Image (cartoon, rainbow, N blue to C red):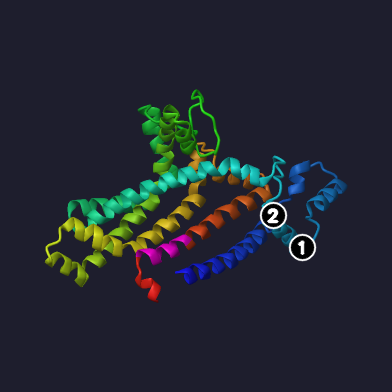
Amino acid sequence: MLRFILRRSISLFFTMIGVTIFIFMLINFIPGDPCMLMYGERATESALKDCKATLGLDKPLYIQYGHFMNRLLHGDLGKSFRSDMYIIDEIKDFFPATIELSVMALLIAAVFGMIAGVISATKQYSIFDYTSMVMAITGISMPIFWLGLILIIIFSVQLGILPISGRISPIIDFQVNTGFYILDCIMAQNWVALRDVLWHLILPSVTLSTIPMGLIARITRSSMLEVLRQDYIRTAKAKGLSETKVYYKHALRNALIPIVTVIGISFGTLMGGAVLTETIFAWPGIGHWVLTAVYTRDYNAVQGGVLMVAFIFIIINTIVDILYVWINPRIRVS
């Protein structure tokens, strides 16, 4: 087990190096001039030249990459061309909102997707099976921006039940410490604020969860059906074990490998795909921040935001690989 974790850690290091090279080159190939953005269209040639020299943009790409890696190893992602703030400070401000939204959406997707998949597999060809699979396909195919607008119209505009945007109501007395509002509310035992924060999370998290929920439901169903046909399941039933014990203790655990894979990949996808959801619901997260940076050609901000999401995605995939060994001990032998 320790050797396996060591191998995956080494692979993780080289993968991250490759990601930094790819993102650095991609950002530098984006058309536009950050100095022109900072000084405006009426900037003189000498001002633009001094700006490029100050930012190091007049040097060859390999030297720029070396400076970038040196700063990155010291936890410095540079400054934003737009706000003149350090990127790492802006990420600390916006990232908790995206993490909170993504985790809530993943919890909704995993719980309801797995329940629907297990029941569909155990009740194959039933009305529930057909209905849940149709809803899963619909959830996968439905555009997030369209679903978000429909939910806003129904639950916010017409029924007036749920808030349209933001993370918490302005009238709530609330002190932010960690940036994770749910955690801050629990630590402060501010239950009124906690209820309001959860109330604001419902619409964006449900909207964001539809695609991974459909994927998890379909993968759970197919994986469970494959396991339920195995001889050891028939043996367990022949021994007189209850259906609940057979399905959830024996079948589900052996069907978890592809499910865990989808859940792990879905979290990384949610992190990157939260841009539309955050834009629709005015959610102050990293996706909305990166989108604004793209519009304003703020290369350092785009680079830092994409790197952070990519690193988290890679780390989650590594954790999923390690979970394989814990879920299925036979992997250790191979």
Majority secondary structure of magenta residues: helix
Frontmost residue, 123 versus 44: 123
Q: Of circles 2 and 1, which is in front?
A: 2
Rendered image quadrant of residue 119: bottom left
Q: Earlier in the sequence, mark 2 or mark 1?
A: 1
In the image, residue 206 sits, relative to residue 176, either above or below, namely below
Residue 121 appears in the figure: no
Query: Magenta residues?
Result: 319-327
> Which residue corresponds to the image point at 44% horizontal and 64% vertical from the top-left?
322
| Lateral position of residue 39 relative to residue 237, left or right | right
| Lateral position of residue 117 relative to residue 203, left or right | left
The 10 Å Cα crowd at callout 1, few under 14, some 14 to 19, many 20 or more, is: few
Distance from the alpha carbon under mark 2 to that under mark 1: 17 Å
Residue 129 appears in the figure: yes
Name, please, the residue furthest toward the top. Answer: 171
Residue 74 numbered tag: 2
The amino acid marked with disc number 1 is Ile
Q: Which residue is mark 1?
A: 63
SS assignment at label 1:
helix
Q: Is residue 324 magenta?
A: yes
Frontmost residue, 77 versus 57: 77
Q: Is residue 325 magenta?
A: yes
Name, please, the residue furthest toward the front. Answer: 2
Residue 92, x across and y down, in percent:
60, 43
Image quarter hosting the N terminus: bottom left
The amino acid marked with disc number 2 is His
> Which residue corresponds to the image point at 41% horizontal and 29% vertical from the top-left?
191
Residue 146, x across and y down, in percent:
42, 42
- The reply to whether dot 2 and dot 1 touch (C-beta < 8 Å) is no
Image quarter hosting the C terminus: bottom left
Residue 107, x across and y down, in percent:
38, 47
